[in-house]
Structure formats: structure tokens, C-alpha cells
Image: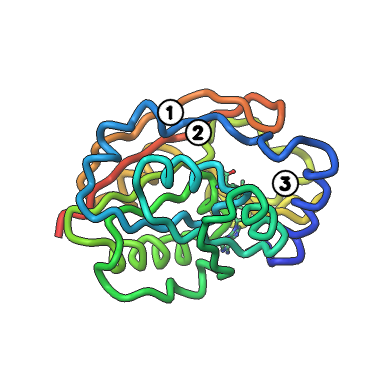
Amino acid sequence: MNDEKYWNNTYTEDLKKYKADFLEDNWMEKYKDIICKVNNKNAIDIGCGLGQDTNWLMKNGFKVISCDISSVALNKLKDLYPDAETMRLDVSDGLPFKDASFGLINANLSLHYFTMQTTNKIFEDIKRVLTPQGLFIGRMNSTKNDYVNSNSREIEKNFYFDTHNGKYSRLFDKEQFDELFSNWKVLVLKETETVRLERKKYTWEFIVQNNL
Ligand SMILES: C[S@@+](CC[C@H](N)C(=O)[O-])C[C@H]1O[C@@H](n2cnc3c(N)ncnc32)[C@H](O)[C@@H]1O
């Protein structure tokens, strides 16, 4: 629900403060065996940001379309990885791709900004563009994070609007995943601790398979 202007400002400010690799925590490496088994090596990186995951996927043999709402992020990604193919889009408008055209879709910390209705719609769209047996992988922020403060307004369960910085964000618990992944084959669903932007955070890592 945060628009392009919000994300362009965020990246412009973050790039002044940190090096471009400030978000790298290489979470996919430990799942390399599962991820690289995918036959169809066409992939999308949704909410790719500066492209750390895109780079990992390209290095591991995937042909990636890096998608993001922020043109600032995509321009920086192109500087860092000139071979990358980028596409500016708002994932909540629907994915502009044919059915069953990708073997892998990654969404790393990029799908927790929406109402549950929109989140469900995005998950259905991801399923539509994945090949049968294709993998949907990613991470979401966990309810274990202490992000809720006096500026947070709960819009729906676990979905907040921060009146101080104007950011919408959703936190996930196991129950929500059980619903969201009820028609997927769950290969990995694990709550882990990591560090991003010099801050400890808890995320859910997931790898689910289209079981069409
Ligand atoms: C926390 S960042 C994660 C970026 C990257 N995946 C990473 O791990 O560094 C969230 C990303 O989602 C993108 N994003 C937010 N809302 C979006 C939307 N509606 N459509 C596409 N991308 C979106 C933001 O621009 C941002 O790059």
C-alpha cells in the first residue's frame, strides 16, 4: 500500500547512509540444493530492491526478471548488475506474465505491505504464473518483531499503519501461513533471526511448491 514515491524516498535516504550491499544476508545459500533442482530456470524476483537475491539467482543459473515498484532501486540494481533484466511494476496490480511461465518466484521481505485480501490475490497470481511443481520462495516479517509502538494503528489483524513514517506493514504468524499455503506443498517454513540495516529481526523463511 506504500506507493512508488514512498519507496523511492526510502532508497534515496538508505543509499546515502549505507553501502549498496547493506541488506545482504545471503539467506538462500542454505537452501541451494532445493532451489537449484528446479527444471525451468526462468524466475521472477518480486520486490527485488537492490538485487542481492537476483544476483544470487543469476549466479546459480537462473534467468531472472527483477521487479520492483521503485525506479530508484531498479536503477541502482542495473548499475550493480548490468546483465539483469528489470521491470517496474506494482505487484498488487497483477503480474503481467503468462500462466505457467516461471519455474521459480522469489519474494524476499516484499509481500508484507498489503491487506489480507490483496495478499491472497497476490499469492493466487503467483500460483498462476508458476509452472506445475514450480517453487515460490521468500521471507516475511514475523510477529516476534517488536515493531508495534505508540504510532502503530492496527488496520486488520497483524497489519499496521505507522502514523510517524507513513509505512504499512504486516507481521506473520504460523496460523496465517497455514491459511495462505493451504493449497501449496510446504517444503520449508522456518522462523529465523537475522540482521538487516544493522538491526536484529525475525523472519519466516519459506519454500512452497505449486502442487498443480
Ligand atoms: C524490504 S524491501 C526488500 C528488498 C529486497 N527483496 C531485499 O531483500 O533486499 C521491500 C521491497 O519491496 C518493494 N515493494 C513494495 N511494495 C511493492 C509493490 N506494491 N510492488 C512491487 N514492489 C514493491 C519495495 O520497493 C522494496 O524494494
Q: Tell me which amino acid carries mark 2.
A: Thr
Report the disc number at residue 152.
3
Give how far apart the Cα atoms at labels 2 and 1 are.
6 Å
> Separation of disc 3 and disc 2 at Cα?
20 Å
Mark 1 vs mark 3: give the one in front: 1
Residue type, label 3: Ser
Q: Position of residue 158 (x, y in %)?
A: 55, 46
Q: Earlier in the sequence, mark 2 or mark 1?
A: 1
- Marks 2,1: beta carbons within 8 A: yes
Residue 7 lies, in percent from the top left, at: 71, 58
* Nearer-the-camera pick, 146 or 128: 128
- Residue 168, how many percent across, how many down? 66, 55
Residue 131, image x and y in percent?
Answer: 22, 61
SS at badge 1: strand
Earlier in the chain: of badge 3 and badge 2, it is: 3
The crowding category of the residue bearing disc 1, from other C-alpha atoms within 10 Å (few below 14, some 14 to 19, many at least 20), is some
Q: Residues within 10 Å of mark 2 (few under 14, many from 20)?
A: many
Residue drawn at the location 72% of the way across and 59% of the way down: 72
- Residue type highlighted by circle 1: Glu
User: In the visual, does 171 lie left or right of 35?
Assistant: right
Dot label at residue 203: 2
